[in-house]
Image: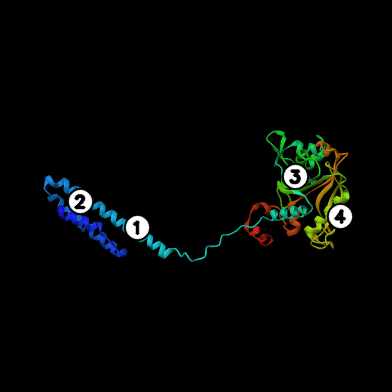
Amino acid sequence: MLNKIKALLQEVEEMKAANAEELEALRIKYLSKKGEISALMNDFRHVAADQKREVGKYLNELKEKTQNRINELKEEFSNIQTVNDDIDLTRTAYPVPLGTRHPLSIVKKEICDIFGRLGFSIAEGPEIEDDWHVFSALNFADDHPARDMQDTFFIGHNPEILLRTHTSSVQVRVMEKQQPPIRIICPGRVYRHEAISYRAHCFFHQVEALYIDKDVSFADLKQALLFFAKEMFGPETKIRLRPSYFPFTEPSTEMDISCNLCGGKGCPFCKHTGWVEILGCGMVHPNVLDNCDIDSKVYSGYALGMGIERITNLKYQVKDLRLFSENDVRFLRQFESAN
Ligand code: DAH
């Protein structure tokens, strides 16, 4: 019996199979219930007691080696099969789906690019702000009713820490650090305590521009506004300035552009006036300059601020503000070509 086992061990070591069927035949031959090894196991009871130990050792070795060899061959087949049948290395890759830029990002970039051409560089500031940078430094007196113009989210119970209600806070941060000439554009998200509806949201986006130097005049502001309006909405665009009030500018104005839907003739979009409001602006109030340690007797400047959602609505006629934050890809995909 020992000889038979040794002969089989030899056979198993040299065992080869050309395909899966041959391998299965080998498995049946050696390992199945009626196979060679089972037969030897059955005969094992007839082995003389003093030889059982040695024969048992060889028999176990044979069983183990056969199993391992068959597994080895199986693995070789499965590797060869995947390479041959499943992977076509010449096939072109699946296309990677690319996202599209968000419409607000597209418009933000456009606004920044236009001011970039006028020499403005980008400045950014924190969304969690303090009272000084959002209100006090911008000439909002403690009890000034203008504070109510912007419903504020406070953080915790501390009236000093809040979410910025406008990007004008970035003006203050830059002026505190840098002496004129200053020519910056500040895009960013702002927050207001508003009920969410199709025309208001508790957060939205603004771009602020600030230019401070010697002898900056209202005429410079008007030039920049006209340039911006024509670049953004087309060369036919007209602007008009209406007197307004902001604590941080004096004089202050709001700018309208000729309605870009009806060309100024009057339509439901411009409520038949021919004009739509797009931004607030003015000459920086001397108190603001002094609050930031810039000498208001030497320097003057203009500032302006606009809502990116508003400009986007005008460009793309988006009727419901909420669409901008819902991330519905059916909405976002429509801006693919504007990228
Ligand atoms: N901060 C104003 C707002 O949120 C917008 C604004 C108006 C900014 C006039 C300015 C400005 O810099 O001069 O409504």
Tag 3 or tag 4, which sits nearer the N-term? 3
**Residue 167, label in figure:** 3
Asked whether the residues under the numbered discs 3 and 2 touch, taking CB atoms below 8 Å apart as contact, a structural biologist would say: no
Identify the secondary structure beneath mark 4. Answer: strand
Asked whether the residues under the numbered discs 1 and 2 touch, taking CB atoms below 8 Å apart as contact, a structural biologist would say: no
Q: Amino acid at mark 1?
A: Glu
13 lies above or below 188: below
Q: CA distance from mark 1 to mark 3?
A: 65 Å
Residue 308 position, x and y percent, is 74, 52
Q: CA distance from mark 1 to mark 2?
A: 25 Å
**Residue 240, label in figure:** 4
Q: Hey, which residue is sitting farthest bottom in the picture?
A: 90
Q: Quadrant of the C terminus?
A: bottom right
Give the residue number, with chain letter if any, for mark 2: 59
Residue 87 position, x and y percent, is 44, 63
**Residue 313, label in figure:** none
Instruction: From the viewer's perspective, tell me whether residue 146 is left or right of residue 325.
Output: right
Q: CA distance from mark 2 to mark 4?
A: 102 Å
**Residue 75, label in figure:** 1
Tag 1 or tag 4, which sits nearer the N-term? 1
Asked whether the residues under the numbered discs 4 and 1 touch, taking CB atoms below 8 Å apart as contact, a structural biologist would say: no
* Residue lying at 41% horizontally and 65% vertically, measured from the top left: 85
Instruction: From the viewer's perspective, tell me whether residue 5 is left or right of residue 299.
Output: left
Q: Hey, which residue is sitting farthest top in the picture?
A: 158
Identify the secondary structure beneath mark 2. Answer: helix
Q: CA distance from mark 3 to mark 2?
A: 84 Å
Q: Amino acid at mark 3?
A: Thr
Mark 3 CB near ligand 1 (8 Å cut): yes
* Residue lying at 82% horizontally and 56% vertically, measured from the top left: 227
Q: Amino acid at mark 2?
A: Leu
